[in-house]
Image (cartoon, rainbow, N blue to C red):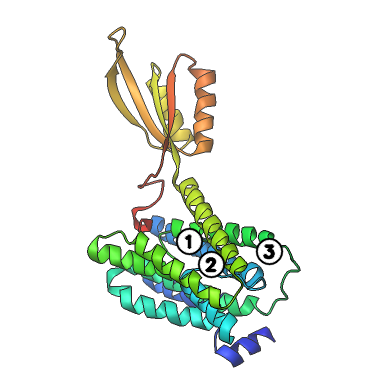
Amino acid sequence: MIKIILYAEYGWPLPAETGVVFLNVFQRVAQGWPNETLKEELRTFFIVTFGSLLFALSVTFFVVPAKLPSTGVTGIALFLKYRWGWSLGLTTALMNLALFAYAWKALSKRFLFWSVYATLLISVSFELTALIPPLAIDDPMLLVLTAGVTQGMAFAMVFSTGASTGGMDIVTVAVKRKTGIEVGSISMIINIAILGLFIFEVPIQKVLYGLVMVYVSSQVTNSDLRAFGVRKEAMIVTQHVEMVRKYIVETMHRGVTIFEGKGGFDGRPRAVMISLLSNRQAFALKQFLKQNDPTAFMRLSEAAEVLGTGFRSWRSDI
């Protein structure tokens, strides 16, 4: 029944069918790719799919029932929906496709492919989830905070793969690649103007609620993106170089770089080992050294972002 309604009103497939279409395109594009690249892009598919669905659910369940404002393309689409009852999904899709048409020459094929997939999946999901009865939540602040957190998580998931959810992100990336200029301030001004539109549609209190939601969303996005990229950099000074090297390489399956150093106090030669690890691996290495090499020196520090084999791919870096 739902499928019939969607086809009759909008002529759109369901999100599952949208995924099948993109998987078919993905299979053609992926022919000849190395296995590592294929695994990475399949992982991207699942992350982008989940993040896009989470964003659509957040807007439908928490933003629309409370008639909250938002920013970007979604904000404009929400204003048109509140004002004249326009279709949220269709309006979002048309505006995003127009932005992609403007910016496609400045965007990488990979970024374009996954971003188009994310925006279309979000647009279709808007219409599908709108058929589900809204949640019975009357507390506006609870709706605001829940919407901000879930949207921030969704954005972080999609951004971590090197894709976007469309909207102002497309313009920002396109202008940056064309001119090298950071346009964060321009994007902020546009978003403030979009929020200002809602003064003519909803009470000022809800506009302020929308401002809180956008702030929470941006903070969660930034926090989660840092969490996705942060790794531990371990520096070890030890007399048992081979034992530690074998543990890092053969047990943890991580790389390690070994330098020749010299003690500043006694002038003796020392091997200095550096390895980049996940939090779990850093803890495991500490336990290993504690049990097997208690005289070793170890320093752990945070690496804000790591790109390369075994970590975030260069392909996913916008």
Q: Position of residue 145 (x, y in %)?
A: 63, 58
Look at the numbered discs 2 and 3 and tell me whether their residues touch, using CB distance below 8 Å. no
At horizontal 40% and vertical 65% (from top left) the residue drawn is: 189
At horizontal 38% and vertical 44% (from top left) the residue drawn is: 306
Which residue was labeled with disc 1?
158
The front one of 13 and 239 is 13
Q: Is residue 118 left or right of residue 110?
A: right
Which residue was labeled with disc 2?
52
Q: Earlier in the sequence, mark 2 or mark 3?
A: 2
Classify mark 1: helix, strand or loop.
Answer: helix
Which residue was labeled with disc 3?
140
Quadrant of the drawing holding the C terminus: bottom left
Amino acid at the residue labelled 1: Val
Q: Nearer the viewer, mark 3 or mark 1?
A: 3
Q: Is residue 121 visible?
A: no
Disc 1 crowd rating (10 Å Cα; few below 14, some 14-19, many 20+) is: many
For the residues labelled 2 and 3, the Cα–Cα distance comes to 24 Å
Disc 3 crowd rating (10 Å Cα; few below 14, some 14-19, many 20+) is: some
Classify mark 2: helix, strand or loop.
Answer: helix
The front one of 247 and 101 is 101
Look at the numbered discs 1 and 2 and tell me whether their residues touch, using CB distance below 8 Å. yes
Quadrant of the drawing holding the N terminus: bottom right
